[in-house]
Image (cartoon, grey):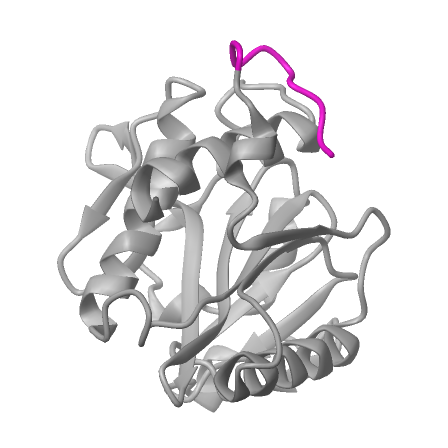
Amino acid sequence: MLPDHGFGSLNLDALVKPEWKLSDAPVPYPEALAHMEARAEAIAAGTAGEQVWLLEHPPVYTAGTSANDADLLEARFPVYHTGRGGQFTYHGPGQRVGYVMLNLKQRKPDVRAFVFDLEQWLIETLALFNVKGEQREGRVGIWVDRGNGREDKIAAIGVRIRRWVTFHGVSLNVEPDLSHFSGIVPCGVSQHGVTSLADLGILVTMADVDVALKQAFQKVFG
C-alpha cells in the first residue's frame, strides 16, 4: 500500500480494481515484457484479473511497430523491438512507467477511446502537481507549453491490444536524465524537446507520483 503524500484523504483501498503492482527496484525490460504477455493471456482466458504495474526500467531504448531505424541516433543503451504501437522511446531511472493490463471487452471495446483515456489519465495526474499537460493533434503523448512557441514532451504512450486485453502503457518523466533522450528521435518528433517534473521545478518523490496516478486513474477509468 502506498502512503498518502499530501493529496488529502485519498482512500487507496477503494482503488484496487484493477490490482496495483509496484516494483521498487528497476525491472529489466525483457522481464517486464514476459510478465505483461503472460498476464494479458491470463486476463483474456479469464484466469486473472486486470492489473496496473508501476515500475522503472534500467536505461533502455524501445522501438514500437512504427519505429524508423534512422531515429536511433546512438545506441548507447540496449535497444528492444517490441510489439507496442509507436516509435522509439527511452525508459530509465527517474521515469515512472505504468503498464496497463485491462480487459476492454468488459469496459469499452474501443481502441481510440482507450488511448484517449490514457492521455486523460496523464493529464489529470499532472494537474495534481499544477502542471498543464496537453494533447496535440498528430502527436501521441502529453506536452507542456514552455512559452515562446516551445513545447516539450513530458509523457509518452504506447500500447498493444490482443483479444481486447491491453498491455504496455504510459511513461511519465519525473526526474530522469533528460540527456539520455538524445540518443533517439523520441516518438519520431525532432522539432520539440522533452521535459520532466523536475525540469519544470516540481520536486516530488516517486511515491507522490504513484498516489497521483492512482487518484487520477480512478477519476478517468472508474
At a point 64% along the width and 75% down the height, the residue shown is 74
In the foreground, 209 or 62: 209
The percent coordinates of residue 133 (x first, y second) are: 31, 36
The percent coordinates of residue 29 (x first, y second) are: 73, 74
The percent coordinates of residue 169 (x first, y second) are: 48, 64
At a point 19% along the width and 36% down the height, the residue shown is 149
The quadrant of the picture occupied by the C terminus is top left
> Where, by quadrant of the figure, is residue 12 drawn?
top right
At a point 40% along the width and 31% down the height, the residue shown is 126
Tell me the chief SS of the magenta region: loop
Q: Start and end of the magenta stretch?
A: 1-9
User: 22 left or right of 219?
Assistant: right
User: 220 left or right of 203?
Assistant: left
The quadrant of the picture occupied by the N terminus is top right
Q: Is residue 3 magenta?
A: yes
The percent coordinates of residue 103 (x first, y second) are: 41, 72
